[in-house]
Image (tube, rainbow, N blue to C red):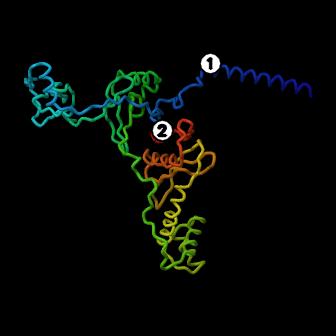
Amino acid sequence: MSTIISILFTYNQLLLSQINQLLIFIAKNISLKAPKYDMTSPKYKKLTVDRLPIIKTFEKLDYKQMLKEYKIANAKDKKPVNPRGKNPVEPDTVCPRCDAPHNYIYDNAGGRGQLCCKVCDLHFSKNKVNLKTELFICPFCGHALSKKKDRKHFFVHKCVNKKCDFYLNSLAKLSLEDLEEYKKDKHKFKLHYIYREFTTDFFDIDLYSMPKGSTSLKFRNFSSHVMGLCLTYNVNLGLSTRRTALALWEIHGVKISHVMVSRYAITAAAMVKPFVDNYDYKPTTYLAADETYTKVKGVHQYIWLVMDAIKKSILGYQASFTRDTGPCILTMRMAFDKFKEFPGKSLKFIADGYTAYKLA
């Protein structure tokens, strides 16, 4: 017996020694302060959101006022452009910043599309005459971002500068295997800096509107008792509207259509919704978010939920046909509306690695 104990003790000491060595190896080689979304494979960088760009704003100018100021400062008029090349500026071209006519605009790139205004010194493209009031600048290299994709709720702007520090660092982190795959299928990797400009104002969307198709509680053919039976079978027991109508006929002798059962359910939801939405949940600072899908009449719909992780109360919810950022933002808005005073940085928001949550 003593021999077995001594063997087990020796083996236990050996295991503790190996664990000690593993801890030393982890402490030396694995950084515990790595960024939260520093994925091992560069393919997963599509799940990350880059930091905000530098926003450069442009003010609208008046070319007539600028010509007057030039004349006062230089005691002479600014002469119009004397075109000598093979690519004259079209007569309907106007400077998007100062509204200078075409005789003050010259071709700056030998017919490749770039024009320059002699009055305000603005460089712009003849194919994109409308000047944006804001210009997005890459925070790593200072180059202007190019609009590449038009999504449902946002535009994707990308830094195409091949000498950008962000791109060079991302490229340097690729293994030889990933580098070979990147040369074949570049769309699988995210190496350039990108910024998503949202085009929808989600703060103007009504979160608390009543559902379509709801009816009133003025009963004509049936009573409130029949409505209660419909809700019991349809909601509490989870029967379909057709099964509910069949149960009411076979059990209670009430002849009702499945359409009326559906209307009763929608009406009840419309009546309960304001109480659910406006109730004072007194949420904690620990929120959890997730999405799932359900099938309604053969069509997939996504259900978004944000709940209080401590009290288990649902603070925000949305149903949508798409799994994109829009309904995610509305769900978070509804949840944050439950706070009388927003907790700010003390809020702990837990979600999975799906990009929509970081974007929202």
Residue type pointed to by label 1: Lys
In the figure, is residue 100 to the left or right of 274? left
Q: Nearer the viewer, residue 346 or 32?
A: 346
Q: Which mark is residue 28?
A: 1
Q: Nearer the viewer, residue 166 or 26?
A: 166
Q: Residues within 10 Å of mark 2 (few under 14, many from 20)?
A: some
Q: How far apart are the two marked residues, 1 and 2, measured between alpha carbons?
A: 31 Å
Residue linked to disc 2: 358
Residue type pointed to by label 2: Lys
Q: For the residue labelled by badge 2, is the local secondary structure a helix, a strand or a loop?
A: helix
Image depth: mark 1 or mark 2 in front: 2
Q: Residue at x 56, y 39 (%)?
A: 347
Q: Position of residue 217 (x, y in %)?
A: 49, 72
User: Relative to residue 278, is residue 171 depicted above or below?
Assistant: above
User: Relative to residue 282, is residue 259 depicted above or below?
Assistant: below
Picture quadrant where residue 55 is located: top left
In the figure, is residue 286 to the left or right of 181? right
Quadrant of the snapshot with the N terminus = top right
Picture quadrant where residue 141 is located: top left
In the rendered structure, which disc, 1 or 2, sits on the residue that comes first in sequence?
1
Q: Position of residue 160 (x, y in %)?
A: 33, 28
Q: For the residue labelled by badge 1, is the local secondary structure a helix, a strand or a loop?
A: helix
